[in-house]
Image: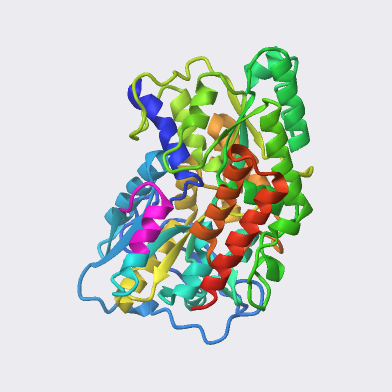
Amino acid sequence: MRRRHRALALMAVAGLLVAACGGDDNGAGGPTTIDTAGGTDTAGGTVPTDTGTPSTGGDAAPDLPPCPLEALDAASGPVEVVVWHTQTAEPGDTLAALTEQYNASQDRVRVRLESQGASYTELKRKFQAALPSGDLPALLVFDDTSTQEMVDSGVILPGQSCFDAAGVPLDDFSEVATSYYTVDGAFWPVAANLGGVLLYYNRDHFKLAGLDPDAPPRTLDEMRAAAEAIKAAGVAETPVVHEMSSWKTEFWLTGAGASIVDNDNGRGPGTTSAATLASDPQALQLFTWFDDMVDDGLLTAVPASDGQIDQYLALASKNASMLIETSSAATSIEVFLGGGDVNVEGLDEDAPSPSGLDIAAAAFPGLVPGHATQMGGAAWYLTNTVAPEVQAAAWDFITFLNSTESQLALLTGGSYIPFRTSVLDEPEAVEFFAASLSGQWLEIAARQIDAIDPAFPGPLIGPYDPDVREAIEKAQDSLLFGGATPQEALDQAQDEIDEAFELYNSF
């Protein structure tokens, strides 16, 4: 039971869990290949034919560096591809299993996974330390905040180069994801793991409070009303527990159509130089909601920090009824609630048991109706610091990763919404959505992602993490633990983010 309790620690540490790797179920021998005349990859997934049009569906970026796909054919022996990642628990197990499957399917490429800890902060430190020497792996799996930083680093080969060289348009890939990760007309990652956010809630608490457990809150106003009913019924003293990670705040704001920074939320042609939080009515509305919920004893605010698990413990111990968290934890939560063993460290043997909990998940309750949110998850980047044959070998693995079978495995085993939208209609995906608890939850998250406006998928920020996110989290701490008013907290975040831009843009 102690190890089962530890499962919750993973979900909190990972935040927007992200992992990606490739695998097929047919054990095909030989390397994954693409028939540019049209056909299938050796993993069994259909590969789109070359349409002769830009892969992003928009203007192709000029003067992209070449992607040397032919270099793998000239390699004298097996080529090693190193991947830096941060995956753990069910997503990590899926990554390891599929990587092993890929390695066994052919003899030209050997993929080696190197874990860089359980947080993107640890991975980013390793990446930044390696930048001066260029001693980087072939593939990096970074979270969604790192897009502009990857572009500006100068060490990434645009994924667009390889998609174009292979004759693979992005028509079958998520339009929201391709829009989110496109900068200056080019799609930068070579693969993406899509994640969203859900409301996890205790159905029994809803019933005891006279609420319909099949009609969960759709907005923050409705979430407050449900919390008031639960508290009034004496079911839970503080019905909502919320870990104050910045990414959740960003999702609320983007979902309400609010920019976080200037220059068209960082996506305009000019220079992004300032936050927009201090003057944004939606940001003030959200911070006021936080403040009022805490003042009225309806919400327990948990400070954001690596390894934080108090929000999960509150739900597991039935001290709280509702929790906003990542959809990427769905399979881990299902294993945990079912008494399964998820291998993570961090919880002692006295942690509360989840036995008897009837936990459900619902769409993210937004500031406005419609469950609007923003793009989340992570992306795989191919570096330009490795030899051409290593780049080609990495692309071979990525092709495998983007296959139908790999995307299905990442969905059912790792809780990642498929990057290829056609996978959602595969019989195995449909069965998974219908037959399993985590599948039902992930279908909700998939619908939310599909509903995001591709023209407003989320901000593009250079000093995103840690600068912007730390500024937002510090402002929230000032609001909820330091006595600042909502406007004062937003002014604080504004000033710190503006300073971060000034420093970032000076280089």
**Is 21 above or below relative to 36?**
above
The picture places residue 119, in percent across and down from the top left corner, at 41, 49
Is 476 located above or below residue 34 in the figure? above
- Relative height, residue 52 to residue 445 (above, below): below
Which residues are drawn in magenta?
Answer: 115-127
Quadrant containing the N terminus is: top left
Foreground residue among 427 and 211: 211
The answer to whether 334 appears left or right of 118 in the picture is right
Residue found at the very far bottom of the displayed protein: 63
Q: Is residue 124 magenta?
A: yes
Query: Residue 439 at what x, y percent from top left?
Result: 56, 36
Quarter where residue 5 is shown: top left
Q: Tell me if 490 is positioned left or right of 419 in this view.
A: right
| The quarter of the displayed image where residue 234 is located | top right
Q: Nearer the viewer, residue 283 or 67?
A: 283
Q: Position of residue 248 (x, y in %)?
A: 61, 45
- Count of numbered marks: 0
Is residue 22 visible to us here? no
474, above or below 317, in the image: below
Compared across the picture, whether 330 is left or right of 448 comes to left
What residue lies at 41% left-to-right and 54% top-to-bottom?
A: 121
Is residue 354 visible in the rendered image? The answer is yes
Q: Nearer the viewer, residue 344 or 481?
A: 481
Q: Residue drawn 70% across and 44% down?
A: 485
For the stretch drawn in magenta, the main secondary structure is helix
Magenta span contains residue 68: no
Give me the residue at 50% from left, 83% from top: 64
Where is residue 13 shown, x and y percent of the image?
43, 41
**Most foreground residue, 411 or 146:** 146
Q: Residue furthest left?
A: 77
